Structures are given as C-alpha cells and as structure tokens.
Image (spheres, helix red, strand yellow):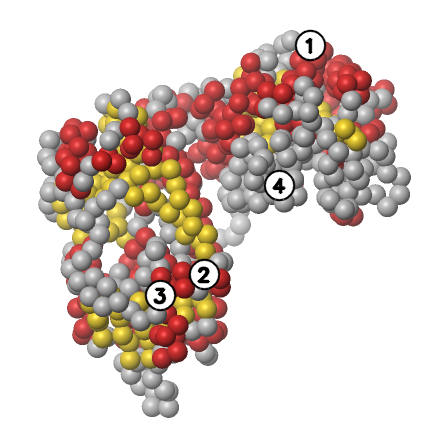
Amino acid sequence: MAGALAVPAPDAARAPLRIAVIGGGPGGLYAAALLKRLDPAREITLWERGAPDDTFGFGVVLSDETLGGIEHADPAVYQALRAEFVRWDDIDIVHRGHTLTSGGHGFAALGRRRLLEILHERCHELGVDLRFRAEAPPAAELAAAHDLVIAADGVHSLTRQAHAAHFAPRITRHRCRYIWLAADFAFDAFRFEIAETGHGVMQLHGYPYAADASTVIVEMREEVWEAAGFAALDEQASAESCAKIFSDALGGRPLRGNNSSWTAFRTVVNERWSYGNTVLLGDAAHTAHFSIGSGTKLAVEDALALAACIEEQPDLPAALGAYERERRPVVASTQRAAAASLRWFEDLARYLDQPARQFAFNLLTRSCRVTHDNLRLRDPRFTDAVEREFGCPPDTPPMFTPFRLRGLELKNRVVVSPMDMYSAVDGVPGDFHLVHLGARALGGAGLVMTEMVCVSPEGRITPGCTGLYTPEQALSWRRIVDFVHQQAPGTAFGVQLGHSGRKGSTRLMWDGMDQPLDTGNWPLAAASPIPYLPGISQVPHALDHAELTAIRGQFTAAARRAADCGFDLLELHCAHGYLLSGFLSPLTNRRTDEYGGSLAARLRFPLEVFDAVRESWPAERPLTVRLSATDWAEGGTTAEDAVEIARAFAAHGADAIDVSTGQVVPEERPEFGRSYQTPYADRIRNALSVPVVAVGAISSWDDVNSLLLAGRTDLCALARPHLYDPHWTLHAAAEQGYTGPGASWPLPYRAGSRTPPTGRTDAPRPRLSLN
C-alpha cells in the first residue's frame, strides 16, 4: 500500500487535471475524494447510473491494514468510518451440531449504505461533481474530453468490454450459486454453518455489520441449487426458504433481501489495467471471492495506490504504470488465496466426515492466509485441541508426529522430494550422490528419496541420470544406503524407479533442459509416436507388445536390485510425462489397441508394471506411486481423472499416492503459487481415504504443519528448500523449540541444535525525546 498522502500546497503553474470517474461504488467515490483533496483545482465528475441510496449487499468488512491507509490518506473519512464500525474477534464454525469457536481474529464491519453515505458527504465537501441516475458517456468519449478516466464500473464493466482487445480480460464463472441477504439481529461472531439437506450441502456465511443487523450469504453448488428449486423462487421466497434451512443459526428469525438474486461468482483477471488515459479500478480490474474478504477492501486499496502514484510520478503514463506494478502482485496474491478458498467451499462436501476440530481448522486455513503458527498466536487453546485430536504427542508439532506405511514407521512427516542431479557416469551414482543424499539424511527428514533411477540405458533422461540396471550401479547404491542407515538411524531411504519415455536422450539440465543431445542420441520409445517438443525433440516409436513385456521386466529387475540394496520404500514414477505417465495422459497416448482410448485402457500398462513391481518388492516394504494429477492443458488429465487413477493404484495395493502435477506437455499453463499442487493431494486423500504425499512450493514448516492438521495430506515432500538447506527439518525443529524423537540431531552436530545468537536485541529503548 502507498505511504501517507499529504495535501500539497497549491501550485499555480500546474494545469488542472480533468478527471472522469465511471461508477459510484466505494472504490470510485474514494478515488474521486482522494484526488480532489490532493489537488482542489482538479475538476472531477463521477457518473453513477443508480440513485444515491441504491446498493447491493449489506455489510462491508475492512481490514486494519486498509483502515490504516485510509487514516493516513484522509483522517476525516477514517473518523467517520471509525464511529460506525462493529468489531468482533471470534469465528464460530457449526459442524453437525457442534459449534467450535476460534478467537483472536479481529474484524471490523459497517453497513454498505452507510459507507456510501460517508463517501458521498466527503465528495460533496470537497467539490466532486456527483451525477446520480446518469449513464456515463462512452469511455472513448470521456477519454477524449478528460485527462484521466477511472473505470470503477464493476464486474460487468462496460469500459472493460469497450476496450477488451487491449485489457484482454479473462472471466471465469464458478460452480456455486450464492445470494446476499440480511437478518435484523447481530451475530456474536463471524459464523459458518453447514446444512446437509436432501438436495445436497448448503452453507451460510454470516457476520454483524451493525448493532442490530447481520449480513447472511447462502451458497451451494449449482446442482444443489437447482435440485432445491431455488431457480423458480423470487427474492422473497428465496429468503424465506433460506431462513427455514438455517433456522437454528438465525434463532427462527426471518431473512430479508435488497434487490437480492442468486448469482454465480466470476473471477475477473485482466492482462492490462490501463489503456491510454483510462484505468480500471476495483471489480472492473479484478475480483476475489467474498469468502476471504470484501471486494470493497481491494477497491479502496486500489484508490489509495492510484492517488499516491499520481502524486509521486512525473506524468500520467508513469503514474498508471506505477499503480499497476504496485497493485498487481498484491491482487494476484489475493486472487490465489481467494481461488483456494472458493474451491474449498465448492468441494465442501468432501470434508464433512472429518473430525469436527479438524474440519474447523481446515476451514480456517483453507486459503493459506491463516496458518497453524498464526492461528496458535490468535487462539492457542483452539489449536492445542486440534493437535490433540490429530494425535500429536505432548509438545510435538504436527510435522514431527510419526506415520506408518505398511511395515515402515517414519519418524516425522517430512520427505526430501526426488531431485534429478544429472551427475552420474554410465548410470552409476558416485561420491556426489553419497554427499548429496547423505547430507539430507543427516538433516532430519523422515524419508529421503533418490532422484528418478532409470531401469535401462534407454530409459535415462540424460547421460547424467542414475540407473539400477547393472551390478556396478547396485553396488554403488548399496554404499549410499548403508551410509544413510548407519549415520542417520531412523531416517528411511526410498528409491524412485522410472523410465524417461519420449523425454529421454536430452542434455544435462544446465546445458539446455529438454533439448536433444548434440551427439550420441539413443532411440526413444513411448506410448505413441509424439515428440515432446515438436520439430525439436526426437520422434519416439510406439512400443509394441513385446517391448512392453521387456520394459515390465526391466522394472521388476530394478525393483529386485533395489530390495537387495536395502532401500526402505519404492516409488513408481508415473508422472511428469515420462514413460508410464505418457500412457496415462490422453494428450500423449493415442493408441488404438488395448492400451489406449478410455482411462481404464490407458491405465492398463502402468498397472501391469505396478503389479509386477509389487510382486518383486518385499511384502513388508511400502510401494508408492507418483502421479501428475493434472496436465495443466486442455484435453489432458483432469483432477477427476487423477482421483480415478489413484483409486486404481490403491486398489492394486499402492500404500500412498505422491501427488505432483504437470510437466507432461510443453504447452502447459500451471497456476503457480504457494503450495499450488497441494489441492490435488487433498482431493485424492479426502475422496479415497488413501495416504498421500503433497508436493509443490511447500516452503515453510508452518505450511507443513497447516496442511497436516487440516487433513489435506499425510506427508509433505520438499525439494528446493532442501537444496537451500540440507538440514531444513532439524532447523524447523530448533525454530519450534522441539527436541523430541521426531528430530534427532546426529551426535557430531548436537552442539548446533540451538539457533545461534544474531546480535544484541535487548538494548534499552529511549524513553524521552527532546525538542
């Protein structure tokens, strides 16, 4: 957010800036007021098609951060808002008759109509020309007659539509229907209530916004909404029906509407926010689902930033560029959190069988904005109860709770994820692998995984990939396994077996990832003759039945060697576009025999390999499978497909599913972000009740604890954090003050088990200041 705004002294040399504002919502009004206050010479006109007291919704929630920005920018508006706010700290979550309360959250809300009145009054005081019941002239006409046009005309912005070729909007319609209603009493807390009806699951989001009024949002999946007959009900009948469904939450009181209608949420994203002298603000530029906060909050913050940038920058193009650079990362982060929250509520039915406290914790942490650590600060009693229900031993963070897979007990829930090192010679792991894997085993993780170990020379990705197809390779692996077991007792060591398929015969990653070798290429084989990089990669040949049988034998031979080496766990690599993954994805499997076509047919060969490996692998040792749960590409594997693929492997005896995503086709478009792959692990775990490993930008021990306690995963695999810090797990224990058996320091390292001092922090603070 921009810093404090100061009203500048009048500058006679400065030409007045003519500004048009389209839309009389809070964002447009506040932008107009700020810009007029900063330079009274400005001529600012605002068009609003509705009447002054027309508004949708009821209450508006603003954060302390937003209020702080308002206080610095315009104390008069802040004081008026402060006098109206209703504040509360608790969140009540009602789950199958049990009310669980979490405190310490801190909310402030007021009526939307009162917010608009305050902003109207401020605009009138400052001399903004407010034109109600007036359609704004077309955006292009306004742009020609004004120095700046602020389009704050909402989610259905006509300005954005008029210049769609430039703004390049992407609008996504989601799967739930919701309606804004109100009740004439104040909830004592932010309330989430679930109704399990004969038509499906419905939810209520309620919060007070005045001493005698609360906002009530009722939401449900579209198919539930249709089955319940809401499509045929008007506003009054919908309010009456919702009041009956949630009569316990409302204490039998009625609900009322305000031009309320059922709608589906739309996420708005724009490639660009400005065009010439026209700029988008608030919902016209971006939307974020109401379940993580108010769109009003984002719009007001946009207005603050836009006004600050106009004051700070030398000209309008620089100001609009600075505004977008400042706000875009904030909005993108908010939209990622909102998308996670939105999906959580869309899939709410998946979590209803969770224990009540875990369900409540899951709901509170659904967007990753609230985590285990800050929830503990807000309400330690609630968090302690969740941990006890989870099964944490006393004084033990969730990540250091043991976990059993078949005959293997892991001392904690941290996995060093497989990471290709491209440092082998003829498939033989050398001293580098001993040091690399040994260091991470000494670093405290419960399970350390090898990189993908290839089952044949032709199955390598690069000439630097390791293998388990010769006695020399097995002997070298045995040396590393022995080191881990002897020097890091209690740390399990797992091997990942795979075959590169169409992604083989490429250069080392740092010499050109996925690029074919300059010389010495070996022939590639895959499910279908489709190159990974068209026009660049080698075209693989489609495997025939005899070759499929031979490759299945290579996997079983490698599994037997892995067992002889002493590995504790084996993982079958069926992800990232390698051979077995290539059979699973419809984008890479175009076969017309029994191994192609339907999902069941595409599963056939990977399951045959799995069964053969399971038979060759010791019965007491766990066997897991890594999957790409989505291809991130149109026509590819979907999340629904991934559940069915995981179901098939679990039915064949997989002890856990390691859930990754993508890397199957080069045209993928991943939705990167913090813990961005974990929703797929969550989906599989809660649909099938099968253990899962979550991966993908999990970077902090707080994230690990949060994901585990919420029931979204059983184990967390981290790659880059372990490259940055081989002792990541031990350091996580030290930072949490944990010294139990889940994180035992090697004896030579024990002196380093406390965080080193970083300098004096206890210097006396000054008590007096002299003027």
Query: Where residue 252 sits in the image (x, y, percent)?
Result: 11, 31
- Local SS, label 2: helix
Question: Nearer the viewer's eye, disc 3 or disc 4?
Answer: 3
Residue 497 showing in the rendered view: yes
Closer to the camera: disc 4 or disc 2?
2
Q: Are marks 4 and 2 in contact (CB under 8 Å)?
A: no
The mark nearer the N terminus, 3 or 4, is 3
In this rendering, the answer to whether 516 lies above or below 596 is below
Gap between marks 3 and 2, in whole Å? Answer: 13 Å
Identity of the residue drawn at 69% across and 17% down: 609
* Closer to the camera in the image, 424 or 432: 424
Circle 3 is placed at which residue position? Answer: 151
Total marks in image: 4
**Which residue is disc 1 drawn over?**
615
Q: Residue 403, can we see it?
A: no
Q: Is residue 734 left or right of residue 74?
A: right
**Three-letter code for the amino acid on which mark 4 is drawn:** Arg
Quote the CA–CA distance across marks 4 and 2: 39 Å
Look at mark 2 in the image and give the residue it sits on.
164
- Type of the residue with mark 1: Glu
Left or right: where does residue 422 sit relative to residue 644?
right
Identify which amino acid the numbered label 3 is placed on. Ala
Q: Position of residue 92 (x, y in %)?
A: 25, 34
Secondary structure state at the residue bearing disc 3: strand
Report the disc number at residue 720: 4
Measured in 3D between alpha carbons, the distance from the residue under mark 3 to the one under mark 4, in whole angstroms, is 42 Å
Mark 3 Cα shell of 10 Å, populated few (<14), some (14-19), many (≥20): many
Disc 4: CA contacts within 10 A as few (<14), some (14-19) or many (>=20): some
Q: Earlier in the sequence, mark 4 or mark 2?
A: 2
